[in-house]
Amino acid sequence: MECERVVADKGYDSDAFREYVAQIGATAVIPPKSHRKKQYWYDKHIYKERHLVECFFNKAKQFRRVFSRYDKLADSYLSFLHIAGTLIWLK
């Protein structure tokens, strides 16, 4: 997978994970743990947008068909996810 940034919470704040993100050519947007000796800088504005994505997934899980994965084919599942996203957006 190609990406510009990897946005994660403090649970993923490790040197090994940060090195992996750097190897794939992305920027790690991970707030450092409070007990870290070396406090890394991260873009706080991009990290705040992570909350919007988590809220969308929580709202999408309200649709029983999405969280229980009734559709066996990926295309059918994605189609219903689009419908659920549209309904969430229209609310």
Image: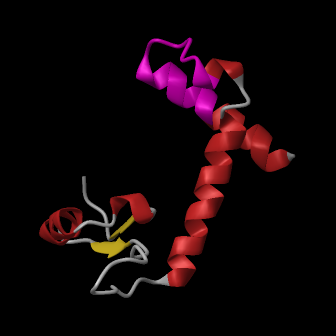
- Up the image or down, 91 lies above or below 65; here it is below
Residue 48, image x and y in percent?
A: 59, 73
Residue 38, image x and y in percent?
A: 27, 87
Closer to us: 48 or 35: 35
Q: What is the span of residues highlighted in magenta in the rendered image?
A: 66-81
The image shows a total of numbered marks equal to: 0
Q: How is the image coloured?
A: secondary structure
- Up the image or down, 39 lies above or below 65; here it is below
Along the horizontal axis of the image, is 52 left or right of 47? right
Judge whether residue 72 is colored magenta.
Answer: yes
Q: Splitting the image into 4 quarters, where does residue 58 fall? A: top right
| Residue found at the far front of this picture | 35
Q: Residue at x 78, y 38 (%)?
A: 87
Q: Splitting the image into 4 quarters, where does residue 83 fall? A: top right
| Residue found at the far left of this picture | 23
Q: Residue at x 34, y 60 (%)?
A: 12
Along the horizontal axis of the image, is 83 left or right of 32? right
Judge whether residue 71 is colored magenta.
Answer: yes
Q: Residue at x 43, y 23 (%)?
A: 74
- Up the image or down, 85 lies above or below 67; here it is below
Magenta: main secondary structure = helix
Residue 31, image x and y in percent?
A: 43, 75
Along the horizontal axis of the image, is 39 left or right of 88? left
Q: Residue at x 45, y 62 (%)?
A: 9
Residue 13, image x and y in percent?
A: 33, 66
